[in-house]
Amino acid sequence: MRQFLRFKQAHPGCVLLFRIGDFYETFDDDAVTISKALGLTLTRRTEGLPMAGVPHHQIETYLRRLIDQGFRVAVCDQIQEAKDAKGLIERAVTRVLSPGTLVDESLLDERSPGRLAAIACEGLGTQQRIGLAVVEASTGAFAVTEIGPSQLVDELTRRGVTELIHSDQAGGLIGSATGGSSGAGVAAAIASAAGALGLAVTPRPAWHFRSDEACEILLKHFRVGSLAGFGLEGGEPAMLAAGAVLRYLLETQAPMHDLAANGGGATGSCARPLAHLQPPRRDALDDACVLDAVTLRALEIERTLRPVAAGSGLPGKPGQGLGGDGSLLGVFLGTGSSACKTAMGKRLLREWLCRPLREPAAIRARHACVASLVEDRRLADELVAALSEIQDIARIAGRLAIGRATPRDLVALGSSIRAASTLLDTIRGVPALQPIAEALASVLPRLLPIAERIRATCVDAPPPHLREGGLVRDGVDGELDEARRLRLDATGWLSEYQARLIAEHDLPSIKVGYNSVFGYYIELPQAQSRRAPDSFTRKQTLKNAERYITPELKVFEEKVSTAEARSLERERAIFDDLRAKAAETLEAIGQCAASVAELDVLLGFADRALRRGWVKPEIVDEPVLRLVGARHPVLELSLGDRFVPNDVSLGEAEAALALITGPNMAGKSTFIRMAALVVILAQAGSFVPAESATIGVVDRVFTRVGADDALHAGQSTFMVEMTETANILHHATPRSLVILDEIGRGTSTLDGLSLAWAIAEWLAVGARSIADAEPPALGPRTLFATHYHELTRLQELLPGRVQNLHVAVREWPPGDLEAQLVFLHRIERGRADRSYGVHVARLAGVPAAVVARAHEVLGTLSVREHDDPAASSTRNGPIAKATGALPSEPGYRAAAAAPTNGQLGLFTEFIAHPAVSALQELKLDAMTPMQAFDALRALHAMVEAR
Ligand code: ADP
């Protein structure tokens, strides 16, 4: 227990798995924790000491489950053979695992980066700056950046962070500070990020984040005299975060490194700890099209939000894993798709889709690559074949750096490098791919020699570990060959030796044999023992025979008994030597991995383009979005030809804001999401699902679709909606794309409508023009799906700035409550005539009586709304003011001010139709059939006249 407690103390915050014989045991609180987390039986070793364990051969499975639940785990192994131990067996912590620092293949998800982030803060309130450092332990990528508190969740989401560390004093330092209007403070941001993203959050001692300490560890690790070369300044938050993240990594990874270096052969089997860690690279946030966390989730870029019923078109299970079917990533990586051959490509694809480009030239360059791969299918096929041979060398490099590369890793590295060289030969002549060719050409000469050595040295199908040897080919190493031969040829040698002895000494009864207790022997029948030559030393006397040993046989015996150990040792030395050689090329392996990944993603884009008939988008400078025959990339997969393509035209000659009305289920959401996904695909470098596409580069995509409570735990749905909307209104620029779905749903109808109206107006005339009473500027390109038909009047009120679209529906028979609705999913110009909500309710299976009653209630509600003084005051309240305060656009002001029937005319739906009142007043019992018919005719006329 003292030994256990010593390790426990050295690794605070970790669950300690302690190897005892065939089990990894945990004690005390750890035992209680993991018995709950893993559903294990809790036992007691001694009274009052809870204990729970897992069989050693299943450790990887249990580790995976613990890490997935956000635990940090230290694995303590026996580092001494039980038979060699005098007293207590020596043990050591061989691995420290946490969600953000995994490197072992069995524990990693090949598609997700699994990153560790550290944050350090400076300043208060709106002045607050957060330094963010993000490391991918498995590949060594290291990025730093600086953000505001409100961007934290977005950045952590986008970068695929799984574990966050921060100063244990962060709460105290920043607890009272809130980010002003831009959001809550860092403490709150950490809490909300942890909740929303399921991050493991690990507080670390505050001194790790101090300037001197951070600077020192960075300088030491990267062996530089100043951090200026990395673009880091002393004391700035990004530097503090970088130092803290490095210290944490060294702490968790160093035990493995030390053990590998000491226990794994004295030859120094690996480079210095974390040699694969690249110097921190500063990420500028403005070189990418920003997709915030809300957008990434709402547009289902990485994973789907919720389950969708079978047959509705959208496949997918709830919250399906990364790249699962139903997400945009799933279009490339889901079932049935063969895009992206390598794990590195899969991760880069995620990166590209979550962080599309903004620089037109860079986007066009990617399109040119895709085009050349689409045009030359033979080229593409050859590349795919070569890529299929390439393993995850980025992560192999990571394991090399900490001395955990396996024999299979080494052989995979060799064959992958050779396949990369085939790639290079294949793309040499292709103009668009020159940058990739050059990058590969600059690193391969450094890598090919080691690849060649690995091939010459190692067998093609190596064992997963070196315990029983079997990695090195025959004929590579004389000593190893001999050791192996001895093991194999023991019987042959013995019979040869026996024949020699018989001939030499003329003793035909000599037998040479082996006994597990006494070892090798020469046996003579008792009767002949007197004739034994002098070179024979007696070893054992049996009833009828004597057994001897000779110096020659002794040497042979020693050789054989140690042959196994020697061959293993030899293999280990050769393996370590190769690993050390490979570890000298870590940087080159990293660069090679990057080029391979890039090519893989471009091929993935080409594959989709070819298979689904996607086209190359035209990227222009003007803020326009013109799509012809566009399809939703995910839905077209499941619906095929049944998906109805649509056009989008925003900006330039057309109004930049489109209002889309139409019944529920008609396809409004699908339409607006489609537009956003097409833009994201295009700026990520892909072709797009359309007949043609002209896209003015977008600086940010904003979305407000459906309630997304997970990111705002503890807030009401409406609060979430307004928070997200506020963010859009503050930050959208004329270059942005805004996707709004059903704004104003979470509150009363009139509030909702008023807000929706004001928001649409603000976006249509350009945010700043209203606030500053400047001439109307350009608004962001906006697609605004709404069930408030009243909004469609904006088209007349703001000519040239708002266009109405609706989704075509056929009702049959027309005007009948029992009518069947046929959703044509076709977007047409103009406004929808009404909302069909009650039809949809019937379609959804709401009982007929309830549907009929809803019709009745609808009528009375309209009357009430009309009579409600509060409602009328609203009518003349904020909206009238807002419209009155609009800058002078003559048409707009005139139209807005012109009253219709004494009302503003925006709320016709809430005013009882006169026919309804007239109908209510009829005394049917006192009427003759003729009078009744006249009354009916009058009512009809009233309706017609409207
Ligand atoms: P709304 O937002 O108008 O309520 P949705 O966009 O959610 O409607 O669409 C409802 C369903 O209609 C979708 O699940 C999809 O199956 C189908 N759908 C939408 N657009 C199309 C289309 N263009 N072609 C074929 N089916 C579509």
Image (cartoon, helix red, strand yellow):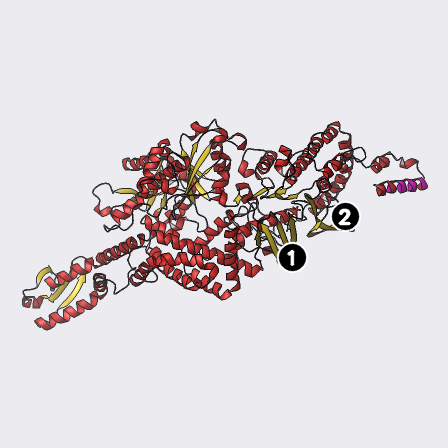
First in residue order: circle 1 vs circle 2: 1
Ligand 1 neighbours mark 1 (CB distance < 8 Å): yes
Residue bearing mark 1: 642
Question: In the image, is residue 932 part of the stretch drawn in magenta?
Answer: yes
Residue type, numbered disc 1: Arg
Q: Is residue 13 above or below residue 105?
A: above
Q: Is residue 918 left or right of residue 398?
A: right
Q: The residue tagged with tag 2: helix, strand or loop?
A: loop
Residue bearing mark 2: 818
Residue type, numbered disc 2: Glu
Q: Position of residue 228 (x, y in %)?
A: 36, 40
Quarter of the picture holding the N terminus: top left
Q: Around disc 1, counting alpha carbons within 10 Å, would you say few (fewer than 14), some (14 to 19), or many (20 or more)?
A: few
Q: Is residue 815 above or below residue 173?
A: below
Q: Which mark is residue 826?
A: none
Q: Is residue 299 left or right of residue 444?
A: right
